[in-house]
Image: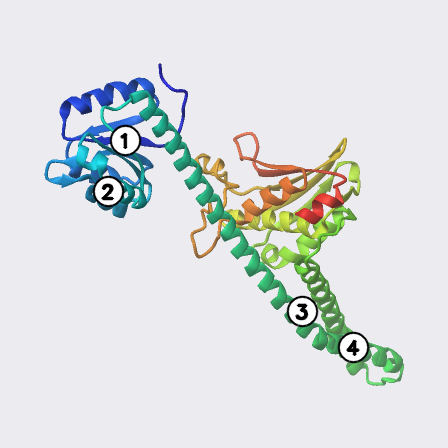
Amino acid sequence: MGLNFKNSGRICVLDDEKSFLTAAKNQLSKYLPGISGFFISKPDEAFEIAAEDIQTIFIIDMNLGDANGMDIYRRISQITKKARVIFITGDAFFLEDEEIRRQTLSEGGIDFVEKPIRWHEMAIKIQNHLRLLDYQFELEAKVEERTQLLIHADRLATVGTMVSSIVHEISSPLTFIKANQETFLYAYNRSKDRITDPEALRVFEDYIVPGVNDSLSGISRIEELLKSFRRFYKREHRISENDMLSIISEVKNLTYYSIKKYGISFNVESRNNCTYSIKCNRQELIQVLTNIVNNAIDALESTQPGSREIKISIDRIDTKIFITVSNNGPAIPEKDMGNIFNPFFTTKGEENGTGLGLAIVKQIVKAMGGDVEVFNRTELKNTVDFVIQIPVNQDPKDAVQN
């Protein structure tokens, strides 16, 4: 009767007795029908199997004619980190030598089993150790993922500190420039009635004053952008009441340069023209939408200029806000659809993308008690849509933990 077990590993039995290999294949195939196995007599074959770098439990005889089981496993462990070994022997010398038994276990052996083998017990040992291998490598992968996310977060924190300094350095001269421009307009308006030269008056009215007004408009634009940067990089765990349109306005400020550079039409639409209110961590939601909008901007680079569009739609259904970020860029390749939110997955290349933007989006939205999905462009629908659903009211206690 087979054991009920599923895993991503396999087994390899190495022994120079063909009758033993036949028995091992028959018994282990019976007890572990879902596990692929190799039953071999030559060490070189074991090395080739190890080179495939797949989680494998090796069952190796300690005495293989001229070869030694420990030496073979030492070579295997140099080839791959995904191998474990159960040593077996029928030789009384190995069974009675406590030093050899200790050494085999200290050098990576997970068990030392005496022949004749109790195959049902061996199958259970294999099952347990393959599970442990699965858990180990899954845990290592998660640790690596978390480590990279922490590195990325640390970089963002560093950038945040730099942005704070840059904002301060820009704000001071910007204040002087604005004050000088406003002073000029004030002085001109006070004295223009005393200008007697019509040509000079025309130059002021047609060129200088409009230029100063444009400069003041540009200064106001820079001030709004600096405020958005300051708010975006300010670390907050505070839950506050926000209207969605003000959040989207900040997202537009943060992505304004790229939107303008690529000639993208940026539109916002809400059901029945409502301004929906949401109780949330403002900075986190801005980060979510900014990441998705930046992703859309990247997608639109390959679209014909003059037709590029990003649209954000807002709706409320019961206790959830639905935010849809659409772009009319190309469809996402079907082979990539299942990996879109996976950490470190990117189609932009290492120099242009970290593969963390959408992974962070997923993580933040999940922490908010919501979810995010992507719907591909089709023949009947000419947009790629990222749909976020989050609760209207979030628990402040959860926000502090996140």
Residue that label 2 marks: 100
Residue that label 1 marks: 113
Around disc 2, counting alpha carbons within 10 Å, would you say few (fewer than 14), some (14 to 19), or many (20 or more)? some
Q: Is residue 62 above or below residue 204?
A: above
Circle 3 SS class? helix
Is disc 1 in contact with disc 2, using a CB cutoff of under 8 Å?
Answer: no
Circle 4 SS class? helix
**Upstream in the sequence, badge 3 or badge 1?**
1
Work out how far the residue at label 2 is from the one at label 3, CA to CA, in angstroms: 68 Å
Is disc 3 in contact with disc 1, using a CB cutoff of under 8 Å?
Answer: no
Work out how far the residue at label 1 is from the one at label 2, CA to CA, in angstroms: 13 Å
**Upstream in the sequence, badge 1 or badge 4?**
1
Circle 2 SS class? helix
Work out how far the residue at label 3 is from the one at label 4, CA to CA, in angstroms: 18 Å
Quadrant containing the N terminus is top left
- In screen coordinates, is 229 left or right of 13? right
Callout 3 amino acid: Val
Give residue 387's position: percent from left, percent from top.
Answer: 63, 37
Q: Is residue 280 visible?
A: yes
Callout 4 amino acid: Ala
Q: Is residue 318 above or below residue 205?
A: above
133 and 204: which is toward the camera: 133
340 and 30: which is toward the camera: 30
